[in-house]
């Protein structure tokens, strides 16, 4: 697995508790979850770029 993928998995696991709190109505937790989701978005984009590079490299 790539380092970015591992970071994505770890980030999701770390935010799980805050998601539960947010669902139960904790407004501070919703802010923390939104912040982490921005990080998830960036990590997902980095993984997407890596996969495109792998695809293009194997075609050569």
Image (cartoon, grey):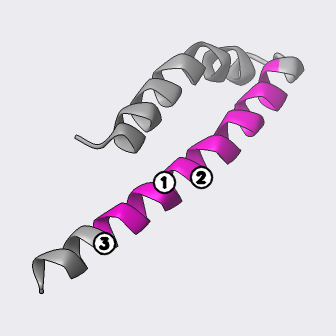
Magenta range: 29-51
Q: Is residue 25 above or below residue 49?
A: above
Q: At 42% from the left edge and 67% from the top edge, which residue is drawn?
A: 49
Residue 21 in the image: x percent, y percent?
70, 14
CA separation, marks 1 and 2? Answer: 5 Å
Q: Mark 1 — residue?
A: 44
Front of the two marks 1 and 3: 3
Specify the quadrant of the image occupied by residue 27: top right
Q: Mark 3 — residue?
A: 53
Q: Mark 2 — residue?
A: 41
Residue 53 in the image: x percent, y percent?
31, 72
Upstream in sequence: badge 2 or badge 3: 2
Q: Are marks 1 and 2 in contact (CB under 8 Å)?
A: yes
Hey, which residue is sitting farthest front in the picture? Answer: 60
- Callout 3: SS: helix
Q: At 69% from the left edge and 23% from the top edge, which residue is drawn?
A: 23
Residue 6 in the image: x percent, y percent?
36, 33
Specify the quadrant of the image occupied by residue 3: top left
Is 30 in the magenta?
yes
CA separation, marks 1 and 3? Answer: 14 Å
Q: Is residue 54 left or right of residue 7?
A: left
Q: Are marks 1 and 3 in contact (CB under 8 Å)?
A: no
Near mark 2 (Cα within 10 A), the count class, few <14, some 14-19 or many ≥20, is: few
In the picture, which quadrant includes the N terminus? top left
Q: Main secondary structure of the magenta part?
A: helix
């Amino acid at each position: 697995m790539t380092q970015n993928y591992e970071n994505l998995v770890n980030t999701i696991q770390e935010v799980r508790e805050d998601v539960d709190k947010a669902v139960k109505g904790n407004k501070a937790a919703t802010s923390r979850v939104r912040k982490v989701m921005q990080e998830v978005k960036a990590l997902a984009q980095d993984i997407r770029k890596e996969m495109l590079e792998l695809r293009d490299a194997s075609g050569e």
